[in-house]
Amino acid sequence: MVAISMGSGASGGRIPLRIITGTSVCDGHDAAIGIMRRVMQAEGAEVIHLGHNRGSEEFAMAAIQEDAHAIAITSYQGGAVGQFQHVRDTQSQLHPTKAGQSVSSNT
């Protein structure tokens, strides 16, 4: 496995990725994102886990406040796809220069 990092920095030439994780509902995916969170942390990423039952605005605000490189949302039956668009729209409204730079999907 390759360490999750980018660029060069003071810590061995690597800057850890900062990733926001969470689920939009409380279903089996809250366990899955917990596993993914641990994998990302084991590979050197800084993970800010919001837990379950989180809305788009919470993800957008956390990404802005934490200066995150990525957001990982999971939900039942592909609901994260629509939520990602809403997160991007919310980020655009709250912080236009950051929106859409690092949004990825985990369904």
Image (cartoon, rainbow, N blue to C red):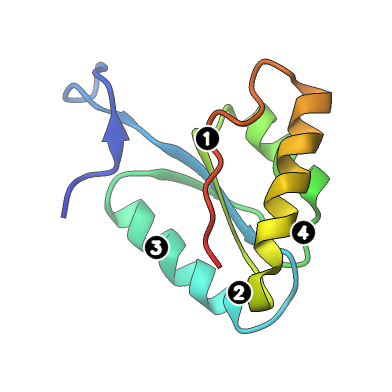
Q: Quadrant of residue 101?
A: top right
- For the residues labelled 4 and 1, the Cα–Cα distance comes to 19 Å
The local secondary structure at tag 1 comes to loop
Which amino acid, by three-letter code, is at mark 4? Arg
Disc 4 and disc 1 in contact, CB within 8 angstroms: no
Which residue position holds label 4? 54
The numbered disc on residue 38 is 3
Which of 85 and 21 lies nearest the eye of the viewer? 85
Disc 3 and disc 4 in contact, CB within 8 angstroms: no
Sequence-earlier tag: 4 or 1: 4
Neighbours of disc 1 within 10 Å: few (<14), some (14-19), many (20+): some
Residue 12: percent from left, percent from top: 16, 25
- For the residues labelled 2 and 1, the Cα–Cα distance comes to 22 Å
Neighbours of disc 2 within 10 Å: few (<14), some (14-19), many (20+): many
The local secondary structure at tag 3 comes to helix
What residue lies at 23% left-to-right and 24% top-to-bottom?
11
Relative horizontal placement of residue 94, taking residue 88 as reference (left or right): right
The numbered disc on residue 30 is 2
Q: Quadrant of residue 31?
A: bottom right
- For the residues labelled 2 and 3, the Cα–Cα distance comes to 13 Å
What residue lies at 67% left-to-right and 62% top-to-bottom?
80
Which residue position holds label 1? 102
Which amino acid, by three-letter code, is at mark 2? Asp
Which amino acid, by three-letter code, is at mark 1? Ser
Which amino acid, by three-letter code, is at mark 3? Arg
